[in-house]
Image (cartoon, helix red, strand yellow):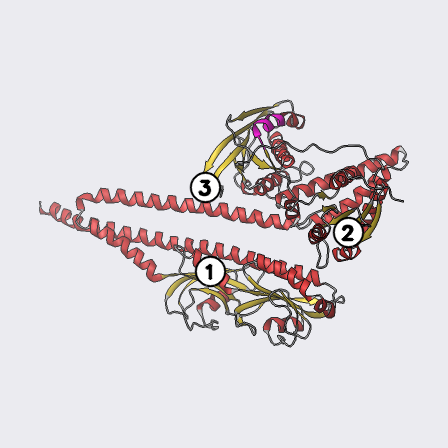
Amino acid sequence: MAWPLRVMLVASLLGPALLFAYAAVVHRGAILHQTEERLERALDIMQEHTLKALQTVERTIAETNEVLRDLPDEAIRADEERFRQRLKRTQIALPQIEAIWAFDARGRPLVASAFAPVPRDLDNSDRDYFRAQVSQDAGTYVGEVITARIGGMRFFVVSQRRPDRDGRFDGIVAVSVNPGHFAEFYKRMGQGIADSFGLIRTDGVFLARHPFPQGATDRLNAQSRFMQAVQARPEAGAFLATSQIDGIERRIGYRKVPGYPLYVQAGIEMGAIWRELRQALANHLVFGVPATLLLFGLSYTALRRTRGLQAEVARREVAEAALKQAQRLEALGQLTGGVAHDFNNILMVVKGHAERLRRTGLDDRQRRSLEAIENAAARGAGLTRQLLSFSRQQTHAPIVIDLRERLPALQDMLRPSLRGDVAIETTIAADLWPVRIDPSEFELAILNVAVNARDAMPGGGRLVITAENVRLPTGSSTGLTGDHVAIRLADTGTGIPQDVLPRVFEPFFTTKEVGRGTGLGLSQVYGFARQSGGTATVSSEPGHGTTINLFLPRSREEVQAAAPRAGEPVRRTGRGRVLLVEDNAEVAEITKANLEDLGYEVRHVANGAQALDELRPDHVDLVLSDIVMPGPVSGLDLARAVRDRHPNLPILLVTGYSTVAQEAADDGFPLLRKPYELGVLDDAIRAALGGRVLPAVA
C-alpha cells in the first residue's frame, strides 16, 4: 500500500510544479502579447501625430507658394514686411514650426517669418534641403537636423521648390521644424506605453528622439538591426536588438510614415519585460509552494486574472478602434472640404446666368431646359453644403434654442419626407437643457437621419426620437465629458451589418443602389454634431433596427429666437456705389451684372491690395468682397482694414469655402454663402447697409 503514498508524494510536488510551469507560460505569453500591443499603440499614435504635423507643414508651404506665386524676387523684397507678417501669423499658430523661409535661386533669403529684414548676405545654398531641389523637383524634402547660422538653434527643414511661370527652378520655400516638439510629445505619451521613441529618416538619420543621452549618435550605421529590418520589411515590423545609443536590449517596433521618407520607432526594454515576468512568478511562488491544498484556489485566481487581462485588452482595443475611426473621419473631412471653393464658384456662375436668362423672354421649351439647369445647380449646392458640414468648414450661425419646442415642431417637417406607413414618436425630457446650434443645420441633420430610417423600413415601421440630459464621465467612449443633451433617433428597420457600421459617417459611402443616395446624409449629421462641439455615434444590429445618437453640449445662455428668413420680391431699387472685390473673372462678371440689375453702380477690382488702393469713402457706399483671394491681403484682411480705417463703411463678405469663414462670422462681419440667388443678394446688401438711404446713381 506504499505506492498510493508515493503517488501522493509525487503528486504533492508535481502538482505545484506543473501549476508553476503553466503560470510561467501563460504569464510569459500574456506579457509578450501585451508588449506587442503597447508597441502597436505607441506606433499608431506616433504615426498619426507625425503625419498631421508634416501635412500641416506641407499646407503651410503650399500657402506660402500661393502667396508668392509669380512674384519676382524684387517685388518680394520690396514688400518684405507685409509678407513676413502673414507668414508670422501662420508660424505662431503652429507650435512645431520655428520659421518659414523663402529663398531665391541662389540660396539667398527673400523673406522669413522670424526675421525682418532677412540678412541679404546669408547663403544657404550648401544646405541639403536646398541642394536637393536645384537639379530636379525633389517634392517634399525632409532635411537632417542642423544648427542655425543665426541664433544657433537646432531644427530640421522641410522644403519644396518655388517654380517660376515656366516651371523652372526659382528658389525654395523652407519650413524650419523644431525637433523638440516631437521629443516633448514622446515624453508626454511615454509613461506606461514604451521607454524610447524616435523619428528617423530612411537613411538612418534621427530627426527627433526621446530620451536623448548626452553624446548619442545622430545616425544609425548600415549594419544596425533597424536598417537591416527596414530593408527586409519596408513598411512596418519589429525586432530585438541592443541599442547603439545606450547599450540596452529592447523590443523595437517601427512603422513607415505614409508619403514621407520617414519612420517612427518605439522600444520597450527587455529587462523591464523580464522583471515583470519574474515579479508575477515570484507572487506565485510565495503563495503557491506551501499551498498544495490550495491548488484549486490558485487555479481559480489564475482564471480570474486571465479573464481580467482579456477584458482589459478588449476594452483597449475598442477604445483604440474608436480613436482610429475618429482620426480617419477627421482626415476625410479635411480632404472633402478642399473641393468646395472651386465647385461653389462654378455653381455661382451657372446659377447666376440661369437666373438672368429666366428674366428674359423664353418659350416653354427653353424654360423647361432652364429649370433643369437650375435644379441641377441647386442639387450641386446641396451636395457642397453637406460636404462642408462633414468637414466642419460650413459656416455656422448658432443660436441658443429650446429643443422642447423645436423637436415637436420638426415632426410636421419630417412627415412629407416619410411614407404613411412610418410612424413618428417623440419623447422629450421635461427639464431638457438648451443647446447652442445652427437651427437650419440641425433640421437638415434630423431630416437626413429620418430619410435613412425610411429607406431602412420598406415595409413600414416606427421612428422614435428621444431627447434627454446626460452627464458624460471622463473616459467616455464618445470622447466627450460634462453636460450634454443626447438626441436618439431609433428606427425599427433592417439594421446595418457590423462590417459596414464603422463607415456609415464617411462621405460618399452608401449601401443603397445607384441613384438612391449620395452617401452624404449621415456625413452631414456627423459634421454638424462635431462643429457644434459634440459628436454623433451609431449602433445597430441586423434585423433589429438602427440608432443614431447626437450629443450636443449644454448651453447656459438664454434661449434666443431664430432670425426670420428673408423673402421679399426682387426689385430694381438699389442705390449707391459698390466696390466688388473678386479674383475669379467669371464670378465677377455675373456678380457685377446682378448688382447692376438691382440698380447699383459697380466698380470691380481683382484683389484686396487693389481694393485698398481704390477705397475712397466718398466714392464707395458698400464693399462686397470674396474671402479667398491671392496675394498678401485676403478678404478678411480687407474687411478688418476697412473697419479700422472707415468704421461707417459697410462691408459684405462672400464665401464658397474658407477655413477662416467662421472666424469672419465671429468677428461680426456679415457673410453671404455661394452660390446665391439674386433675391438673397438683395436681402444681404440691404441688411449690410442697415437701413441706410443712399442717393440714386446718376
| Residue 350, picture quadrant | top right
Estimate the spatial distance between the alpha carbons at disc 2 and disc 3, rounded to whole Å: 47 Å
| Residue 274, picture quadrant | bottom left
Q: Which mark is residue 582?
A: 2
For label 3, the SS is: loop
Q: Camera-side residue: 460 or 6?
A: 460
Q: Quadrant of the C terminus?
A: top right
Task: Tell me which segment is drawn in magenta.
Answer: 401-410
Query: Would you call the spot at circle 1 few (<14 residues within 10 Å), some (14-19), or many (20 or more)?
Result: some
Query: Would you call the spot at circle 2 few (<14 residues within 10 Å), some (14-19), or many (20 or more)?
Result: many
Give the residue type that dot 3 points to: Ser
Q: Which residue is mark 3?
A: 476
Q: Quadrant of the N terminus?
A: top left
Contact, mark 2 vs mark 1 (Cβ under 8 Å): no
Estimate the spatial distance between the alpha carbons at disc 3 and disc 1, rounded to whole Å: 26 Å
Query: Would you call the spot at circle 3 few (<14 residues within 10 Å), some (14-19), or many (20 or more)?
Result: few
Across and down, in percent, residue 103 comes to 66, 70
Q: Which residue is mark 1?
A: 184
Q: Residue at x 75, y 58 (%)?
A: 609
Q: Which mark is residue 623?
A: none
Give the residue type that dot 1 points to: Glu
Residue 17 in view of the camera: no
Image: 204 above or below 289: below
